[in-house]
Image: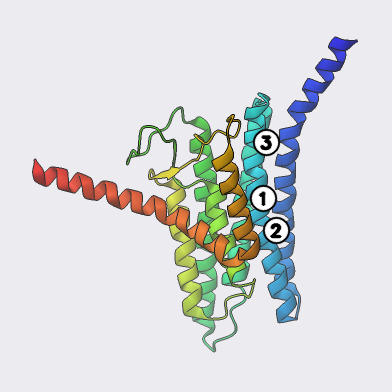
Amino acid sequence: MEQETHSSARRGMYILPSLFTVGSIALGYYVIMESIRGTMVGNAALSAMAFDRAALAVIFAIVFDGLDGRIARMTNTSSDFGRELDSLADVITFGVAPSLLAYLWGVRQLPPTGHPVIEGRVMHFGAVVCFLFLICGASRLARFNISINPQPRNPGRPGRKYFVGMPIPAAAGVLAAVIHFEAGSPIHNLWISLVWLGLVAFTGFLMVSSWRFWSGKEIDMSARKPGRLLTLVVVVIGVVFEWHQTALLVMALGYLVSGVMARLAYSWKRSMARRAA
């Protein structure tokens, strides 16, 4: 009887990480629904609120995505099913949903300019760019799933662990942070829309690049004296809670810039080494 109870509890522990993954999928579905709602309501304020809720849902999904993997590792309940479900969830929540949100928020809401040909070209260009973001994210996940101990082209410190290419949740977080910073108010200027599409395209490129991005996997949440880490987490939560629009934007763009700066610094060091040789 005791052995049967232990077996049932063990099966329950295997389900726990998958529940967070299912929650991430639900948030992705919510992002899609709110993005569509933002284009259908006639009131500008209600439209902005819908887009803002969609952006916040992406942010919450990033938290869920981080928790499912960490819980699986801490409880030693990782499984092939969980990994496959997590990859499918990432494609939906951080690929399909943000690409649709990026298009509907940044391109579809442009007002008529009196140049229907230009408007049509921008709409088509925006659809292609947002679709490429989705493809880059899916390719990034596929590469991650088949890679064994991948190494970036610009290796960092030996004691730190890195992702090869920008993770898809972080890329989706960049788009969501920008939208939330604008309180969901959609873009109504053609040139700003093109700048937005440039950011979407560049973020997609970073996902399929071989540049290094810090993974944070060396952070030990089970340390015996987690005082510093706990203090840092509390400070970050407090800052995000108080100044969420600015804080989330700074964190998202800061992570993006960190990978770009790491690549530029590595290229500069190699150039200096060649000159010295």
Q: Marks 2 and 3, Cα distance to the nearest angstrom?
A: 19 Å
- Secondary structure of residue under mark 1: helix
Cβ atoms at labels 2 and 3 below 8 Å apart: no
Viewer-closest of 265 and 210:
265
Looking at the image, which residue is at 58% across and 33% down?
225
| Left or right of 171 in this view: 64 | right
Looking at the image, which residue is at 86% across and 13% down?
4
Q: Marks 2 and 1, Cα distance to the nearest angstrom?
A: 10 Å
Q: Is residue 140 visible?
A: yes
**Residue placed farthest to the bottom in the image?**
114
The residue that mark 2 highlights is 31
Labels 3, 1: front one: 1
Quick one: label 3 or label 1, which is nearer the N terminus? 1
The residue that mark 1 highlights is 61
Residue 131 sits above or below residue 77 on the image? below
**Circle on res. 85:** 3
